[in-house]
Amino acid sequence: MKYENMEPAVFLERPNRFIAWVKTRRGKEICHVKNTGRCRELLLPGAALYVQRNENPSRKTPLDLIAVKKGERLINMDSQAPNRVVEEWLRRGDWPLCPKGALICPEHTYRDSRFDFLIQKEQKKILLEVKGVTLEEAGIVRFPDAPTLRGVKHIRELTDSLKEGYEACILFLVQMQDVRYLEPNDVTHKEFGDTLRKAKEAGVHILAYDCRVEPELLELRERVPVRL
């Protein structure tokens, strides 16, 4: 996916989950943070950012925070981007479980959950849930960066769907490139990691891919090893 109207900025502070103050060429401006996660290791005073400008008068903020530099690594922080990137990839037919000609249905309701995609090809039905990943340390990426009861519920319902003839998959989209491997963040939420391991044993596909990240581009790139 591509972004337009991008410009550099510097992070100043984040008074709440939804907004940040940044410094642009115009001076100090308010910015919408498109990621409600903690991101404490990313949003440090003085961090280099890329923001997207939208001058629509109906908006409360003229800017969206899209990406942040962590050392030499550029990390996309847009929590709405992973689904769009994965959908582009699915529609190219590059994933064997979703060949060209498959029916791709975003936002599919199953039981009490809404999963990101239902993929249908002849008699095969696949439920796919996408998780964006931004937490990285020494090339190791982890999910989640905060406890997620919703994430645990999703994994359990995906596991239950196997009994009804579905295939099920969780795809972790790492919003950066050149990482070593992905693992569950047991320190932050061990229940999520335990539930993920049980899902793998039951037959749920657990995949991770990294991304090519540029200020104006986010694109699914290569498979990343998953260590459970």
Image (tube, rainbow, N blue to C red):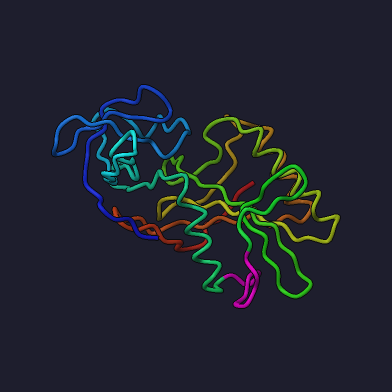
Q: Residue at x 22, y 35 (%)?
A: 10
Q: Position of residue 26 (x, y in %)?
A: 14, 36
Magenta stretch prevailing secondary structure: loop
The residue at 47%/33% (across/down) is 36
Q: Quadrant of residue 104?
A: bottom right
Of 188 and 22, nearer the camera is: 22
Q: Which residues are magenta?
A: 95-104
Q: Is residue 173 left or right of residue 52?
A: right
Residue at the far top: name it. 15
Between 169 and 141, the residue placed more toward the observer is 169
Q: Residue at x 35, y 59 (%)?
A: 2
Residue 101 forms part of the magenta stretch: yes
Residue 41 magenta-highlighted: no
Q: Position of residue 13 (x, y in %)?
A: 30, 25
In x, y percent, where is residue 27?
15, 32
Q: Position of residue 136 (x, y in %)?
A: 44, 41
Q: Is residue 24 above or below residue 3?
A: above
116 vs 88: above or below:
above
Q: Nearer the viewer, residue 170 or 198?
A: 170
Name which quarter of the figure residue 51 lies in: top left
Answer with left or right where residue 30 lies relative to residue 125. Answer: left
36 or 30, which lies in front?
A: 30
Give the position of the N terminus as an image quadrant.
bottom left
Please give the name of the residue rendered at 33% of the width and 33% of the height, measured from the top-left corner.
60
